[in-house]
Amino acid sequence: MNKEGYRDPTAEKAVHNASKVPRRIREVMDAMNKVASLHGLEIVAVRDKHTGKEWRGDRWK
């Protein structure tokens, strides 16, 4: 909602896209969790070395 109380679809879309986990991260995390689960483990976070962004497990599911 903007200051006047109306929906702001542009801002809403931007926020949604900014919080979206990139496909390459999601695919890597899924593969790592499959391997880790064979040993009774779970990967809960990953950090991109290039961008410094960090994703937690609840965001890529």
Image (cartoon, rainbow, N blue to C red):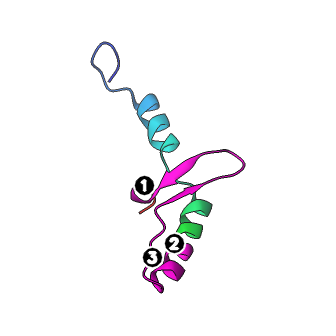
Question: Helix, strand or loop at disc 2?
Answer: helix
Q: Which mark is residue 30?
A: 2
- Residue type marked 1: Arg
| Side (left or right) of 41 relative to 35 | left
CA distance separating discs 1 and 2: 12 Å
From the image, tell me which residue sits under label 1. 59
Choose between 25 and 54: the one closer to the eye. Answer: 54
The quarter of the picture where the C terminus appears is bottom left
Q: Residue furthest bottom?
A: 38
From the image, tell me which residue sits under label 3. 41
**At 48% from the left edge and 44% from the top edge, which residue is drawn?**
19
- Residue type marked 2: Asp
CA distance separating discs 2 and 3: 13 Å
Residue 36 horizontal/vertical position (percent): 50, 78
Compared to residue 15, the image places residue 59 above or below, namely below
Mark before the other along the chain sequence, 2 or 3: 2
**At 55% from the left edge and 74% from the top edge, which residue is drawn?**
32
Magenta residues?
30-58
- Residue type marked 3: Leu
